[in-house]
Image: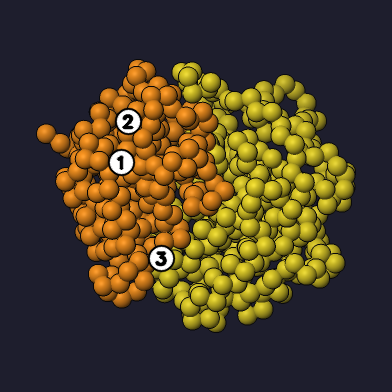
Chain colours: A yellow, B orange
Amino acid sequence: MAAMKTRMSSFSRNTSVAPAPQAPGLKSGPNGTIFLSSGIPDLDKILGGGFPLGSLVMVMEDTEAPHHMLLLRNFMSQGLVHNQPLLYASPSKDPRAFLGTLPSPVLSKDDRSHNRDPEQLQEKGLRIAWQYKKYFGEHRPNFDSHRDTKHEYCNDFDLRKPLERYFLTAQNICCLSIQDPPNLAAFRDCCAKFLAQFSRNNSSISCAGRVAIQSFCAPQCEYSNMEWDMLSFIRSLKGMIRDSNAVAVITFPPSLLSPSSSKRWQHIADTLLSVKAIPDEDKELANLLTGYQDMVGLLNVHKVANVNTQVPVILEATTFSIKLQKRRYLVLECLNQAPVDGSSGSSYASTGSCSGSTKTGTLDF
Amino acid sequence: MDHHRSSTLLDEALALDWTQPRVIVIEDCVETNGAFVLHHVLKRSVCSSHFFYFCCDFLGFFSTIFPLRSHLTKIAWFSLFGGSPCTNFLAGCNLVTPKDNKRFVFFNLLTLECPDGDEGKTSGGLPSLYREIQKVIIALHEENRKSITIMIDDISLMEVAANGSTNHVLDFLHYCHTLTLEFGCLLVTVNHGDIYSSMERPALLLQMEYLADILIKAEPLSTGLATDVHGQVSLCCCWT
């Protein structure tokens, strides 16, 4: 058994592909895990397949940029494309209006070019490709080869094109405003009622559900200064999610919580992500990173859900750039350090170092 | 898994001969989960013979009488899963047999309800939980009481369950500590140290560190990411 062997190095268990779950939009993973897609193909790959059913995903917002909305929109759109019931809660007075901003899936793979840097291929002269890893992903097969968008596990979404109306008129969308209620009891009951339809049992999964909660501790919410009540709600939600075939994504601005409370929220999460804005015209970053001008933000993966395994997921990198390809498609890329200027003998990156990460560093290559 | 096989470095450090130490405190952080130590203790406990365990994972009980051969053949762990009747894979171990033999009792902190008001006078909540633990221990034969392991994963979640009442959680932990002194049980707790790092006087953290016979700290590597290396562990043995 694997447990009898001494761990040598990067041994990975050869897991055979289990039969796909019957419900659409779900995928079997290792160790009996069932995933549903985040709606972002690159993020699914980073996380090892997607979000495991029964897990709680938390996204730490950056108050300087709404990049968490990109993650939330794609997550919600993917669920609606797969006809997965959705519960959406937001501090807005009219949360249903947000559905009109959800992106539409790309209908054809030809519509999106995978050739991200055509100019490099046409350059004359010999160039040594030191950042070859970013070209490997183009040749990997997709999880599903179906052309039908509804049967693809993870779609590419066109952020400039709104989701078709027939997806939004379905009966399986529940929108809630969490601004006015003075406490979270009613919201908890709504979540319980919604998640009851996805209760886990030993039979096959007929349908999976999605819960999307935006800016949970936003100051306009009446309960926003009741930290223990919010923690209690998250604990209850996690307990409910555990017993259901659903995934909950909660975004929150950690700066609005006390440091201690923020850490508690982070610990409760099974998968923990954070988004960060990239300042415009930052010359230091521009010198340090290649492709800086195309980046709109950074995504950090702090924690990945461990399902049915004692081996935690160790990522090669934890920080990824958020880019909008052709200003329409959300992509995540590993950060690549800029090359050394050979002519002058000095490094473009005066202080940047791939190996000098500390526990408090924000960029991990 | 045979408990007579060669021990690991962690085994040697923990010196788990089930007579001492009495309190093991595991501190971890968001970046590095320390629950693997809990899993290790659980697996060692399950695979050893003639053990009674009280395992509190999300506050659970684990009481077993094992034959020499372990019934465990499958290991899978989802540290935050539990409490559901259909989830019999907890913490990397197949716990169906112990549950069926009533040797494993599990309490799910995600669903534990602590009523408001005077905890000392109301039923339910942490006092009720402690009474359950004590009742089971007392019901066991005297010889077997020393083979009990109480595992709590994690204390900060217990605080949330107690609606932020740190004093009640501390009282509960102190009562559990008396069990270790009176009956020779083993108490293993997981605590997230980074939650309390911003506090001036984190009573919960400091008191548990004081009570610990072994303090284990799991942290990320100080040199950054590395393939196949999850983090670093520091052990401090406090007993004499």
Say whether disc 3 or disc 1 marks the residue closer to the N-terminus.
3
Task: Tell me which residue sits at (39%, 42%) in the image.
Answer: B103
For mark 2, does the 10 Å Cα neighbourhood hold few (<14), some (14 to 19), or many (20 or more) residues?
some
Label drawn at residue B187: none
The one of A354 and B28 positioned closer to us in this rendering = B28
Kind of element beneath mark 2: loop
Q: Are marks 2 and 3 on the same chain?
A: yes
Residue A74 showing in the rendered view: no
Q: Quadrant of residue B149?
A: top left
User: Is residue A267 toward the left or the right of residue A73 in the image?
Assistant: left
**Which residue is more in the foreground, A264 or B164?**
B164
Residue corresponding to mark 3 = B113
Bin the neighbour count of mark 3 within 10 Å (Cα to Cα): few under 14, some 14-19, many 20 and up: some
Q: Is residue B12 above or below residue B38?
A: above
Horizontal side, residue B37 vs residue A148: left or right: left
Mark linked to residue B50: 2
Which residue is situated farthest in the left direction here? B240
Q: In which image quadrant can residue B5 be found?
A: top left
Q: Residue at x 58, y 25 (%)?
A: A12
For badge 1, the amino acid type reads Thr
Q: Position of residue B120 (x, y in %)?
A: 25, 69
The chain under label 3 reads B
- x and y percent of residue A321 in the render? 61, 46
Whether tag 2 and tag 1 are in contact, CB under 8 A, the answer is: no
Q: CA distance from mark 2 to mark 1?
A: 13 Å
Q: Which residue is mark 1?
A: B149
Residue A188 x, y percent position in the rendering = 54, 70
* x 23%, y 60%: residue: B171
